[in-house]
Image (cartoon, rainbow, N blue to C red):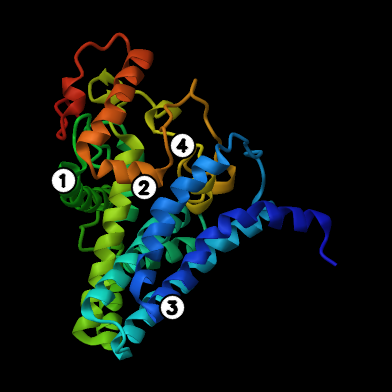
Amino acid sequence: MIPNDTLTRWQSALPFWISFLLIPLVWIAAARGGLWLLAVPVATWWSFGVLDRVLGLNLENADPQTGDGDLRWYIVLTQIWMPLQFVTLFGLIAYTAQSDHLGSGSKIALFFGVGVVTGSIGINYAHELMHQKSRGERWSGDLLLAMVLYSHFRSEHLLVHHRHVGTPRDPVTARYNEGFHRFYPRVLLQSLKSAFGAEKALLARKGQAWTNLRNPFFRYWALQASMLTLAALLGGWSGLGLFLLQAGVAIWQLELVNYVEHYGLTRKHLGDGRYEHVKPRHSWNAAQKASNWLLINLQRHSDHHYKPGRRFPLLQNHTEAEAPQLPHGYPVMTIAAMIPPLWRRVMNPRVRAWRRRYYPEITDWTPYNKAQNPMPR
């Protein structure tokens, strides 16, 4: 018989397992083709937007002092996603190479959906895993990122983004009035450069060159090369192309979320290259229940930056008095981000209200809007 406390913990964690339904859904799409190929984008972008409206907000907070022993059902789901994604991604490459019921267009549509899964779910789980102290969890995160050819995200996120978020030194913080279509090519180049530069500087402080094998970029390159090789072995040139397609879609999904999370929010410059400490006000918060289940509380982003070491079930919801709130969850907001006039109409008034509320003394915001740091380091 299952003890009551174990059953209660399992039941409380159960809604966060909803993302696992996407795995059979993508296999069904591969087997049946046709309109089923739209199932994953519809399920992630549109269905959860509707569910958020129906289910409303989750404003409750778990005890942040809860130990890992009481979180095992939450932790297990992040740990088993990696092997399931690996089998699904490469299994589908092998399957489509042998199938004759899917034409080229159908295969492209299928792997577009796969990229939605590996990006919105896989990279999100990698993000959770890379923040943990366990070597095994961090390795799982590395493998997930290698599957989408974005391994440097770990270095950029931990060494650059968390340190410089809300300042011109952070490539990932979207500037006020910067449309996504300008943000995207900028962040692709700058985040890679900043990640490599951060690891190079870290080694230099230890008296080591960037060519030292301790540089994680050698691990990143080896893992990514292994993934590319496996895709080619299983599916030939077509399999390699489909692998690259899903990786591109996944990266696009990640950077859409990055764009939404900090758009227009900046930390106050204190002089001499110093900025105020990161606070909940420096990230957009979203309390929509269904999309937080899907994204394992990623939308409680204000608390993640305030307390980066917290596991996802312990992230706290910050009220409107403490952190700016998005009008909708990420599924809806990322769609809006793809339409710059709509995005500016929705978000620019909110950014201006945020500035008036927290920084009424700042009258010239021009330096904060620039992609390059205009202030002394």
Judging from the image, what secondary structure is the residue with disc 2 in?
helix
- The residue that label 1 is drawn on is 186
Mark 3 or mark 1: name the one nearer the start of the chain: 3
In the image shown, does 37 or 225 lie closer to the viewer? 37
Residue type for callout 3: Val
- The residue that label 3 is drawn on is 87
Judged left or right of residue 326, residue 318 is right
Identity of the residue furthest to the front in this view = 35
Residue type for callout 1: Arg
- The residue that label 2 is drawn on is 158
What whole-number distance in Å separates the C-alpha atoms at marks 4 and 2?
Answer: 22 Å
In x, y percent, where is residue 2? 81, 64
Q: Decide: marks 4, 2 in contact (CB < 8 A)?
A: no
In x, y percent, where is residue 321? 49, 20
Mark 3 or mark 2: name the one nearer the start of the chain: 3
In x, y percent, where is residue 154? 34, 54
